[in-house]
Amino acid sequence: MNSLDAFANSKLFELERASLRRQLVETRRELEPEEGPVAFRGGRKLLSFSCNDYLNLSQHPAVKAAAIAAIETYGAGSGASRLVTGNHPLFADLERRLARLKGGAAACVFGSGYLANLGIIPALAGEGDLILIDALSHACIFSGSRLAPAETRIFRHNDVDDARRILNAERGRFRHALLVTDGVFSMDGDLAPIAALAALCAEYDVWLMSDDAHGLGVLADGRGSSFIDGSKADVLLQMGTLSKAIGGYGGYLCASQPVIELLKTRARTLLFATGLPPASVAAAIAALEIIENSPDLTMKPLAKARTFTKHLGLPAAQSPIVPLMLGTAEAAMAASKILEEEGFLVVAIRPPTVPEGKARLRFAFSAAHSDVDIARLAGLVAERIPFQPEPVSCQPFS
């Protein structure tokens, strides 16, 4: 055995022993009118509560038809970077729609949400600048900050006072400052205090950036977490994905025209990555059309999540994501197996995705989940799974 294989086998053994080894499991998803979001795994048919397709638009006939038509018209791939020959005509329409929905002057579409953050943050934060990040922000935000020559500080989760403490002590030493947070936290389901952060950033001349991957399409009539209070908070940089409620693939940033033009010139993950395929762009356009014209649909995932939390006596859900804290990776895996045996797919979330001692089941609710199935799932959880009734970080909005 060579040293590389010995290294890999040793790491795999350690991960297996700690119940932290990951494996890809083939999954086929369907939306069945009588049953809701169904997943086929290992030859079994399960009702899925683990998918981020909150509005089930990946299965919508109009979205699929738009993707097929785009392939017939433009082909299967874009063929190059958007700055070479990969900027097919559909991009302009998608970016106009995103900017309109998010209340921005302009938008830029990237290959994925992860690529967006890897490109945006280093393009805006350079040497002599400061980056502040919420401690529970998504991994791609931390990855993007590591690519920037700026200095990075971490503030306590959703703690505006801690962010203020850092700025009060250090803002004066830096040319520019960028504060980045999730709008909806992907593993906890709670909301960032966007309005309070916007006020803080205005006070200290800090650029506020929110990752609204889990807010677009499901909060504030689909406009996302920057609009929770009824009007747009002063978020200069609204980033998100096309792979959750939009039901497809890709990432975006909505911002001012000069900022978007700068990123189209300097964001390395746009410059040096092949543009999204026409089918993905067309599918996103069709999905946004549905979201803009279906306010009742956008309200359903949160309502379903709150039905679940009410059954279990938990604080009202703030988003379609509800974590059930179990502590150890072993406990989370065992709980997931119990639910799978009863016909439910709820994937265990373990370190390093979440901190040590915070392994959990992460429930993701969609518009197509029935109240009957939610009640059955909640009853099973209450009867069979000894979870920790840990409160969420923020008060739920009304």
Image: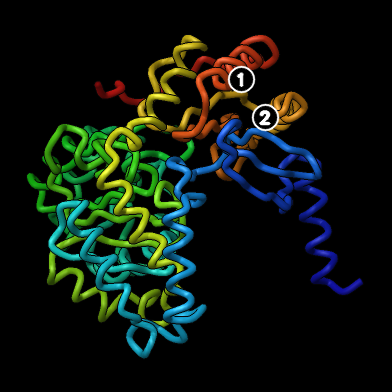
Q: Residue at x 25, y 66 (%)?
A: 95
Observer-nearest residue: 257 or 131?
A: 257
Q: Residue at x 48, y 44 (%)?
A: 56
Callout 1 amino acid: Leu
**Percent from the top left, x then y, of residue 197?**
19, 40
Q: Residue at x 56, y 44 (%)?
A: 353
Between discs 2 and 1, the one toward the N terminus: 2
The secondary structure type at the circle numbered 1 is: helix
**Percent from the top left, x then y, of residue 310?**
45, 12
Image-quadrant location for residue 89: bottom left
> Does the rendering let one see residue 205?
yes
* Disc 2 target residue: 344
**Percent from the top left, x then y, of residue 209?**
25, 53
The secondary structure type at the circle numbered 2 is: strand
Observer-nearest residue: 219 or 163?
A: 219
Disc 2 + disc 1, Cβ < 8 Å: yes
- Circle 2 Cα neighbour tier, 10 Å, few/some/many (<14 / 14–19 / ≥20): many
Observer-nearest residue: 394 or 32?
A: 32
Callout 2 amino acid: Phe
**Percent from the top left, x then y, of residue 216?**
32, 46
> Does the rendering let one see residue 144?
no
In 3D space, how far apart are the residues under numbered discs 2 and 1 (Cα atoms)? 8 Å
Image quadrant containing the N terminus:
bottom right
How did the renderer colour the structure?
rainbow
Image quadrant containing the C terminus:
top left
Position of 371 relative to 190 (above/below):
above
Image-quadrant location for residue 112: bottom left
Image-quadrant location for residue 41: top right
Position of 259 relative to 160 (above/below):
below
* Disc 1 target residue: 377
